[in-house]
Image (cartoon, rainbow, N blue to C red):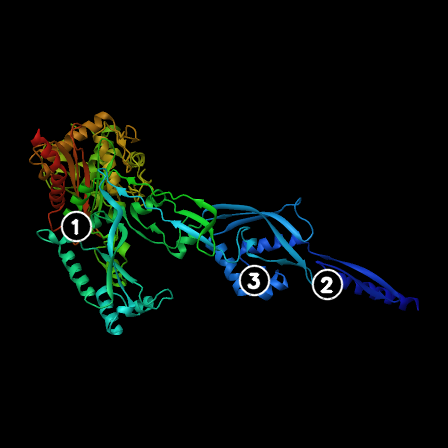
Amino acid sequence: MKRTKRKRTQRKQQILRNILAGAAGLLLIGFAVYGSRAVYIHFAWKTPEELLLEYMEHVSKGEYKEMYAMLDNETRRILSEEAFTSRNQGIYEGIEMTNLKAEILEDGSKGLNVKYASSFDTAAGEISFDNEAHFVKGSSGFQLVWTDSLIFPQLSSEDKVRVSVTQAERGKILDRNNLMLAGPGMASSVGIVPAKLENRSEAISQVSRLLDMEPEEIQSRLSASWVQENYFVPLKTVSKVSETDLMVLKPDEEILKEKERQDDLLSIPGVMITDVEIRSYPFGKAAGHLVGYVQNVTAEDLELHAGEGYTETSVIGRSGMEALFEEELRGQNGYSIYIEDANGSKKTELASVLVKHGKDVRLTIDAQLQRALYEQFETDRSCSAAMNPYTGEVLALVSTPSFDNNAFVMGLSDDQWERLNEDAAKPLYNRFRQVWCPGSTFKPVIAAIGLDSGAVNPLEDYGNEGLSWQKDASWGSYYVTTLKAYEPVTLANAIKYSDNIYFAKAALKIGAESLKNALLRLGFNEELPFDIVMSPSQFSNTDSIETEIQLADSGYGQGQVLVNPLHLAALYTAFCNEGDILSPKLMYEESPAPQVWIDQAFSKNAADTVLEALKQTINDADGTGYGAYRSDMVLAGKTGTAEIKESVEDDSGTELGWFAVFTAEKNQKKPLLLVTMTEDVKDIGGSGYVISKDSAAMNEYFRDMEALQLLD
């Protein structure tokens, strides 16, 4: 009997524990009967304060279903979950609410009324306020009495929350003379007014052909939810053809074609063309790789740049200067978040932030020189880097063939994009950022290294070896060849005649380890100190110069030597600045002071010795660069031809043509240092082809200076 009674007692206790466990979180007073006794049980309901904080946690996470489940029965009777979600989601997400914080105001809360402080971040800045929530008792706990004022204390059910956006103007990209490289411009928006369409199917077919769009895409845009019959539905942005474009003596052929296309479009009933403001690139292909372009942000952009002020209507820099200076150019939109009453009047402003327009970016680039170089090499696979050799200012960076960045802004069709990508000339490939075999333009660098190391005596006659030479029989069938035999074979003549044999011998005298260390000090195997990331120059495919033949070939810019054109231009500044190499700079300054990148890269004596030889190369009638000679100024420079072939025996390889030239006197009114590389010059004149093109571009650049001299 005692054991049976003990079991009954244990069973009652287990029942009691189960009841208590099942009732956790509720505040109830009930009872259970055990035998002849009634035992009162106190269950713990969540307090209104706890429920308010729980509700706010759901708000911060956008958990609208869970929020709705906490509301009192009466609210849920008159307000559907769909309507509740639409109201809350529309407001919280519309103002871009983040980082919500809620705190109970202990002194103000009493019973079923809970006073609290709330704050959160929005597109217009932080919003904070004190508020009060009311709860009622339900059958299973407290329930929140919801009204619109829980979102904002001033908000009623008839009010709307508005977000007003003032779009920031994107800053302009300007050249050194304040010519616009990128900025606001006008284009034409081609679209359809559905109500005015006649024979809809045929009209869409005609428009799709003229705009290079799929008919299905046009139909999809016309069927968008926002479209009404009398609305203008934009389809494509095209170039604006102005009257002034057509009034010139000989209008551009492309402009005439565009005018004809737009006339054909306007002949279709229902088609309209209106003006639209776009990002414009007046120099187009001439500065395509340098300036880059913007495009509309994508969902990925918005996720990647969350919290940075981008919206679905923003643009973002995709390449070139547009991407490099995105932060400075884009500015910050202005926002105002306010409550609007049922009459459409502004009731209360909740938060605001003033618009910050983007900053203009002024570059050291000379747009006229940029265009002159582009026009000369437009059809070549080429690149040019131009600097002021006494300040380090970069005056031009050109890559050809190029692309029109305006086309990217207006939208490329799939066919246009495919043509650009599959073009064998690679117009999207930025050549001035790459490294190339420098050929003989590297010889002045080797000469300066040799002079400073003591390995090269500028007056020593290396002897006339004819047109081919090898150190000894250990080289097997390998010979270094040159184009001209001359005497005496001294440093100045070797530079003037571009003698490969002399510089192969010079490199052997310098030695592999010494040459490696010297080139490392000159910035090889590291990034150039410049705003645009350039591929690092190299002296070998490994971390050392492996063989004697490789060392000899390195002496005249072959072997495994690869150099970036701007890096080479920077190295040449040493010959203008008593051995100091200047940092290339891209940001314009009214009074630019040269910034030394490598102090005394060469001694003054070495730099001056090489400079005199480079003057002879241009100014002596038998110098390899005489084709660039000018009677109105002293130029100095070096030609170069680099062989690109699979092996020593390969006679089907191609050649890179180089020309490095600079004004050699500091009193020059428009100082210029220009380095150009052109591919595939083997059958069109070698480096002479490059000289002729660079000379034409320089004629254009110096023309206004000549005009000033005539006025004087």
Q: Nearer the viewer, residue 442 or 258?
A: 258
Mark 1 lies on residue = 378
Q: Position of residue 449 (x, y in %)?
A: 25, 32
Name the element at disc 1.
loop
Label 2 Cα crowd, 10 Å radius (few <14 / some 14-19 / many 20+)? few
For the point 26% across and 52% down, the residue is 429
**Mark 1 vs 3, N-terminal side:** 3
Q: Amino acid under label 1?
A: Glu
Alpha carbon separation for disc pair 1 and 2: 82 Å
Query: Can you say whether 414 is above or below 201 in the image?
Result: above
Task: Please indicate whether residue 213 sits to the left or right of residue 36 in the image.
Answer: left
What is the C-alpha distance between the residues marked 2 and 3? 24 Å
Crowding at dot 1, Cα within 10 Å, few <14 / some 14-19 / many 20+, comes out as: some
Disc 3 designates what residue?
65
Q: Is residue 287 above or below residue 507?
A: below
Q: Quadrant of the C terminus?
A: top left
Q: Residue at x 28, y 58 (%)?
A: 411
Q: Quadrant of residue 568?
A: top left
- Name the residue nearer the viewer: 95 or 478: 95
One can see residue 590 in this view: yes
- Tell me the kind of residue under disc 2: Gly
Q: Position of residue 359 (x, y in %)?
A: 33, 41
Q: Which residue is mark 2?
A: 22
250 lies left or right of 355 = left
The reply to whether discs 1 and 3 touch (Cβ–Cβ < 8 Å) is: no
Which amino acid lies under the numbered mark 3 shown in the image of this protein? Lys
Q: CA distance from mark 1 to mark 3?
A: 62 Å
Residue 670: assigned label: none
Residue 511: x and y, percent?
27, 35
- Residue sitting at the far front: 343
